[in-house]
Amino acid sequence: MKHIVKRAGHNETYDNHKLYASIFAACQSVREPSGSAELISEKVIKDMAKWIAKKHEVTSNDIRRNAAKHLKVYHPSAAYMYLHHRIIW
């Protein structure tokens, strides 16, 4: 079980469904078609699974930065939206 330290200081269990939803929303916000947004989100989740497997505890900002880095490979505009617009998260 991986723990995320949130900005407010409380801990949460890592939930890849929540991350998937935020990546998908970022893709949708730049008008990426749903099917493509799903594929991109799945790829980022797989990339993040490898990264987070090595961690016991991370901050929500760590997750945001690393997810944006992986998303940038697949869709730079969506990565920008994901990283800079907190309303998506």
Image (cartoon, grey):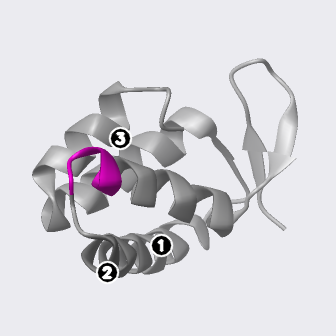
Q: Of the residues tagged 1 and 3, which is closer to the observer?
A: 3
Marker disc for residue 69: none
| Residue designated by label 2 | 35
Q: Mark 3 belongs to which amino acid? A: Tyr
* Earlier sequence position, callout 1 versus callout 3: 1
Identify the residue shown where x is 65% and y is 57%. Answer: 18
Question: What amino acid type should be assigned to the residue bearing mark 1?
Answer: Ile
Query: Which residue is identified by label 3?
Result: 82
Q: Is residue 31 left or right of residue 52?
A: left
Task: Return the x and y of residue 60 as percentages of the image width and height.
Answer: 61, 38
State the image coordinates of residue 42 (x, y, percent, origin top left): 43, 79
Q: SS of the residue at dot 2?
A: helix
Q: Residue 45 has which mark?
A: 1
User: How many other residues sit within 10 Å of disc 2, few (<14), some (14-19) or many (≥20)?
Assistant: few
The answer to the question of whether label 2 and label 3 lie on touching residues, with beta carbons closer than 8 A, is no
Closer to viewer: mark 2 or mark 3: 2
Under mark 2, the amino acid is Gly
Q: Earlier in the sequence, mark 2 or mark 3?
A: 2
Magenta segment range?
A: 27-31
Mark 1 → mark 3, Cα distance in angstroms = 14 Å
| Quadrant showing the C terminus | top right
* Residue nearer the viewer, 78 or 2: 78
